[in-house]
Image (tube, rainbow, N blue to C red):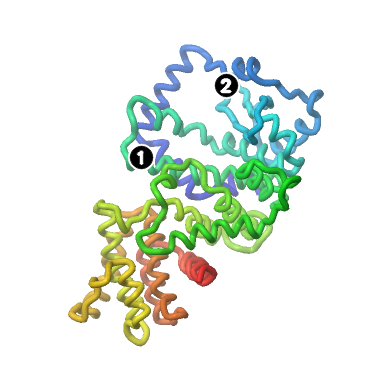
Amino acid sequence: MNATDIRCSNDLALYEKLIKHRDVVRVNDQIARHEADGPTRVRRSLLATSVRLTASMAPDIARTADECIEKLGVKIPLELFVYSSPQFNAACFKPENDRLYVMFSSSLLEGFSKSELKFVMGHELGHHVYNHHAIPIGYLLRGNQRPDPQLALELFAWSRYAEISADRAGAHCAQDMDAVARSLFKLSSGLTTKIVEFSLDDFVAQADDISASDQEPGQGAPQSDWFSTHPFSPLRVKALKLFEKSELYSGKDSVADLEVGVQSVLSLMEPSYLEAKTDTAETMRRLLFAGLIAVADAHAGISVEELEVFAKFFGKYAFSEKLNIDKIKQTVADRALEVKDKASETQRMQVLRDMCLMATADGGVHASEREVLDGVAEKLEISVAFIDQALQLLDELD
């Protein structure tokens, strides 16, 4: 298995879209012209403000780097640096003069085990291997000419998926998922296991608590989440556990199931369509309205519990006995196709996930309800494996 094989599919898809965007092309052209005028002097700055870790000074760290270089197929000379800081941190810089530079904080090198450091090293090298530096997100977001809101959201979403790819590169190097999880715990908390007893189950459970808080209709991810470049650490661990169970690592789950699972996890940081005032959001709400009714009516009519779920989404008086249920059900397929044409894959998954909530309203999912969900998934071009995962998560949160 090589680094290209394990790259997150949403990272690659968004990368290929963004790299062609006129604003990204414009900024990259500006950067190229600036670099043509003279070197960016990254190495000069690192030599002046930090300490270069030669093989003779830090043989264990050099061996760790060599192992990651071999695992990931890095073809460019690498220089390592350390700087003084009490915070755990690391960074990989865009290559300059045909050299790659990775920098670590002093506290990270002292507080991380060899396996944990190997994950961090592989993660940083992963950003280079996947050419993430080609999307100059910092220049785009902080430049004089700010991107339009849609581009900004796509940049942040891509950045989160890019972190998933880099995490997989790190895990591929470390080959020790417990060490990987401990690394993310330390990076998130600033603590070492000398002070607290690390529990992987408890750490991953935080992701389920985030899910639980977002399940209430209208209570999707807050705006601060949409504009985060990194997924929350518990979500990263959950995504890595899915990676571990996939055929890309040591498990049996398909790549398709893995990517669907990761999209489901990261959708917790996406904007909610229930409150948005865009044409796409309105189209999604129209599908949800008809889809909820279709699922609720699929088995033994619409129950009191199902009416309560419907009211949570659309209000106490949204459902009326005067509604033509059969006619509304007949619109589901067309509304789903309209959403497929207008909404992103993650947005389509959000609607489908909310329809799954209706299916579980009366304590179980009947075959006829599942048939409706599968039909909508087909029209939305979403794998039915996503429904399995959504229903399982809802069951766990119940």
Disc 2 packing (10 Å; few <14; some 14–19; many ≥20): some
Task: Give the labeled residue for mark 2.
Answer: 96
Q: Name the kind of residue labelled 1 in the image.
A: Leu
Residue 255: percent from the left, percent from the top? Answer: 56, 58
Above/below status of 345 relative to 332: above
Residue 349: percent from the left, percent from the top? Answer: 41, 60
Which of 159 and 377 lies nearest the eye of the viewer? 159
Q: Which of the labelled discs sits on residue 40, or is there none? A: none
Q: Residue at x 36, y 27 (%)?
A: 26
Q: Secondary structure at mark 1?
A: helix
Q: Residue at x 32, y 40 (%)?
A: 149
Marked residue nearer the N-terminal end (1 or 2)? 2
Q: Residue at x 48, y 70 (%)?
A: 391
Which of 153 and 384 lies nearest the eye of the viewer? 153
Task: Give the labeled residue for mark 1.
Answer: 151
Which of 119 and 23 lies nearest the eye of the viewer? 119
Which of 5 and 324 lies nearest the eye of the viewer? 324
Label 1 and label 2: CA atoms lie apart by 28 Å
Q: Viewed as shown, does residue 157 lie left or right of 105?
A: left
Disc 1 packing (10 Å; few <14; some 14–19; many ≥20): some
Q: Name the kind of residue labelled 2 in the image.
A: Glu
Which of discs 1 and 2 lies nearer the camera? The answer is 1
Residue 243: percent from the left, percent from the top? Answer: 61, 55
| Residue most extreme to the left | 322
Q: Viewed as shown, does residue 52 lie left or right of 394?
A: right
Q: Residue at x 48, y 58 (%)?
A: 264
